[in-house]
């Protein structure tokens, strides 16, 4: 499979190559980005990954539907239990679960492929013969990771919402503050949650991009990003290390439940977005420092 | 371009600089605001606070306590807990909305839960997202305010009120210039005990420069460099809150209880007043307690009623859960077993040595508590 895939990918890179040289690129051309996204979406493993992301909310919703009665009061703070009352809780429960492992894994795979994958296949040097400087290439690579993060989170949210509404219906939503908000307000807040989660995953993508410039083994980059994620979650769970928590990328990832207070509590969310931005800037710059100064031999 | 290619390593300055900016930003934000407040003496500030008549405000409060209490699952609770009684340890976020004496809302924010206390006229709602239960009570219009069932002051106002009560000849009151709290310029009032015998090193009260409302109270212990107890606004607004905040309508699908109905499982009415750990209430003490010493180094010695001793209620002194319910006495019993055993000429017992106060429960049922080191408790017990 890998040999065949290499052939396919090299072929695609070749297409992109000629495409870029045939027409002189405009000041801001989306051609490179579109080609990158086409590559990401076209890879069979990424398509399978999207299926896995989509499967979890379906499994969750069906499981809750089958065991629905008499779970109330058991752990009512949990979004999943509330799903029986309102299908819009299904995407929230799915995001809560997938933000811990599946979505970080998805971005870890994409970011591993971004630079290390190309280097491993020997396509990176061809890519660099395109009249595109390395900084712009890195920007495009990161933009495609951000879009990949958005796509992943959107899949989970939309599939969760559709399945949840189909099985449980939608209606006014009970907030953590005990009062209800209207159904459209609830939909809006679920959409904000999706954007917030995408920001966190995109920030992790910057870490992945940096690691990807350090190695020529995409698997090494993927595993490193997963280790960073898992270690962050573990450290976040240790109260004695509270001084460290503001430095962890996952620190406020679960703060999106603050959107379901009335009125929403923004402070933690803004802090979370600030952390995401800080991670994205620092690691993109680190990736830039590494990528623009290293010798590309493969 | 040529510079970059001749000095490729210089590029690493960019991420390093970004890290530096990220690390420095929080400090820069808190230090940037120049107060520009005219100087006030401590006496003027005290008068200002008493005259302040802020009727409307809303804001976010962060409370953190490091009282040196044993960290057990039953006591206090972790940082994310939304239980109203969990405020005695860790760090907690509260949101308040106040519109005059009759309309208030207090929300204790947990990781994925929330407890609310909403007063609108004579109606008092409590809401717990953990149990999805709303409880409605009717209270007397005369009640000054609806207080929460916690052992520690929940708002900077409460805490400042308690601290200002302590101003007497045993306390030195000074100002230490200005501070910035919740983005507002504030004066700082510093209360220092004159005696060295207490574990309270200093109480610092930040008072809003314009509205003269306490914005933050920090209690420093002689044992710690950081405040042992701190409650302060992280965001505050003195505008009139939206009327929506006080209109609680239980949602369908939630349990609604009548808090006035005398059912066995209805929650107890909130404790009448909040109190700091240094001022034990006398309600569960059988004999009139003996007071040894004065001011900050006061030690209160009391004898527990026999049944309370059996259940070990209130064992950890005035600490956290002196509610007297079966559950809390069982909890207290468990905690007591973990406390170190101490003995001396005064007898023997278990010691709770906190950062701001100490307490001893003797085996013969006496309890001594004070904002002092254990040695002074022993002395007070022996003197009796």
Image (cartoon, coloured by chain):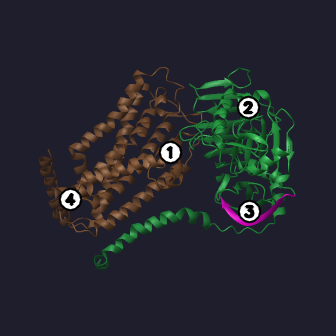
Chain colours: A brown, B green
Residue B206 lies in the magenta-colored region = no
**Mark 2–mark 4 distance (CA, rounded to whole Å):** 69 Å
Seen from the viewer's position, the closer of residues B127 and B252 is: B127
Quarter containing the C terminus of chain A:
bottom left
Q: Main secondary structure of the magenta part?
A: strand
For label 1, the residue is A255
Q: Nearer the viewer, mark 2 or mark 1?
A: 1
**Mark 4–mark 3 distance (CA, rounded to whole Å):** 60 Å
Picture residue at 37% right of the left edge, 33% below the top: A57
Seen from the viewer's position, the closer of residues B178 and A160 is: B178
For label 2, the residue is B123
**Mark 2–mark 1 distance (CA, rounded to whole Å):** 32 Å
Q: Residues within 10 Å of mark 4 (few under 14, many from 20)?
A: many
Q: Of helix, strand and loop, which one carries label 3?
A: strand
For label 3, the residue is B187
The single residue placed furthest to the front in the displayed view is B345
Quarter containing the N terminus of chain A:
top left
Query: Whole-percent x and y of residue A65?
Result: 41, 23
Quadrant location of residue B366? top right
Q: Are marks 2 and 1 in contact (CB under 8 Å)?
A: no
Q: Residues within 10 Å of mark 1 (few under 14, many from 20)?
A: many
Q: Of helix, strand and loop, which one carries label 1?
A: helix
Q: Which residues are magenta?
A: B169-181
Q: Of helix, strand and loop, which one carries label 2?
A: strand
Q: Is residue B271 visible?
A: yes
For label 4, the residue is A119
Q: Residues within 10 Å of mark 2 (few under 14, many from 20)?
A: some
Q: Chain of mark 1?
A: A
Q: Chain of mark 3?
A: B
Query: Whole-percent x and y of residue A143?
Result: 33, 56
């Amino acid at each position: 499979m890998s040999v065949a895939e290499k052939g396919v990918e090299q072929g695609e890179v070749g297409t992109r190559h000629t495409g870029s040289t045939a027409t002189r690129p405009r000041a801001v051309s989306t051609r490179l980005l579109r080609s990158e996204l086409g590559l990401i979406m076209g890879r069979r493993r990424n398509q399978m990954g999207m299926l896995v992301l989509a499967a979890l909310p379906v499994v969750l919703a069906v499981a809750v539907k089958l065991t629905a009665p008499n779970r109330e009061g058991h752990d009512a703070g949990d979004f999943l239990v509330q799903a029986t009352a309102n299908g819009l809780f299904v995407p929230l429960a799915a995001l809560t679960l997938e933000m811990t492992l599946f979505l970080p894994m998805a971005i870890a795979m994409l970011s591993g492929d971004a630079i290390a994958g190309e280097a491993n296949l020997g396509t990176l040097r061809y890519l660099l013969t395109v009249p595109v400087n390395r900084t712009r290439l890195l920007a495009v690579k990161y933009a495609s990771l951000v879009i990949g993060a958005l796509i992943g989170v959107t899949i989970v949210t939309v599939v969760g919402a559709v399945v949840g509404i189909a099985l449980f219906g939608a209606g006014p939503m009970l907030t953590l503050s005990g009062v209800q908000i209207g159904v459209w307000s609830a939909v809006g807040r679920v959409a904000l949650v999706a954007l917030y989660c995408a920001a966190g995953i995109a920030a992790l993508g910057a870490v992945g991009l940096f690691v990807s410039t350090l190695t020529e083994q995409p698997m090494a980059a993927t595993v490193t990003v997963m280790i960073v994620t898992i270690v962050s979650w573990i450290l976040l769970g240790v109260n004695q290390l509270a001084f460290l928590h503001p430095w962890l990328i996952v620190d406020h990832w679960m703060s999106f439940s603050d959107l379901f207070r009335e009125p929403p509590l923004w402070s933690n969310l803004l802090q979370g977005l600030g952390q995401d931005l800080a991670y994205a800037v620092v690691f993109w710059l680190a990736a830039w420092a590494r990528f623009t100064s290293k010798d590309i031999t493969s | 371009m040529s510079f970059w290619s001749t000095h490729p390593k210089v590029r690493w300055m960019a991420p390093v600089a970004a890290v530096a900016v990220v690390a420095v930003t929080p400090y820069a934000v808190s230090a940037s605001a120049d107060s520009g407040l005219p100087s006030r003496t401590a006496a003027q500030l005290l008068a200002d606070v008493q005259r302040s008549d802020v009727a409307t405000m809303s804001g976010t409060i962060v409370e953190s306590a490091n009282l040196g209490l044993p960290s057990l699952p039953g006591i206090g609770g972790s940082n994310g807990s939304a239980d109203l009684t969990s405020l005695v340890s860790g760090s907690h976020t509260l949101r308040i909305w106040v519109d005059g004496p009759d309309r208030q809302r207090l929300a204790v924010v947990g990781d994925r839960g929330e407890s609310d206390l909403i007063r609108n006229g004579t109606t008092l709602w409590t809401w717990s997202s953990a149990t999805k239960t709303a409880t409605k009570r009717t209270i007397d219009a005369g009640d000054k305010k609806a207080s929460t069932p916690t052992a520690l002051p929940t708002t900077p106002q409460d805490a400042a009120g308690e601290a200002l009560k302590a101003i007497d000849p045993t306390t030195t009151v000074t100002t230490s210039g200005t501070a910035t709290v919740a983005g507002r310029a504030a004066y700082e009032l510093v209360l220092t005990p004159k005696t060295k015998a207490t574990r309270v090193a200093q109480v610092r009260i930040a008072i809003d420069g314009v509205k003269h409302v306490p914005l933050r109270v920090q209690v420093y212990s002689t044992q710690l460099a950081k405040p042992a107890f701190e409650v302060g606004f992280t965001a505050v607004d003195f505008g009139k809150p939206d009327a929506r905040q006080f209109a609680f309508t239980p949602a369908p699908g939630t349990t609604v209880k009548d808090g006035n109905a005398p059912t066995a499982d209805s929650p107890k009415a909130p404790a009448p007043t909040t109190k700091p750990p240094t001022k034990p209430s006398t309600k569960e003490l059988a004999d009139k307690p003996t007071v040894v010493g004065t001011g900050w180094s006061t030690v209160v010695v009391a004898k527990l009623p026999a049944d309370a001793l059996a259940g070990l209620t209130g064992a950890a002194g005035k600490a956290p859960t002196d509610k007297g319910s079966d559950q809390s006495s069982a909890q207290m019993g468990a905690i007591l077993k973990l406390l170190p055993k101490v003995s001396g000429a005064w007898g023997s017992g278990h010691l709770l040595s906190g950062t701001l106060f100490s307490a001893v429960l003797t085996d013969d049922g006496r309890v001594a508590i004070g904002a002092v080191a254990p040695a002074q408790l022993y002395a007070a017990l022996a003197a009796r």
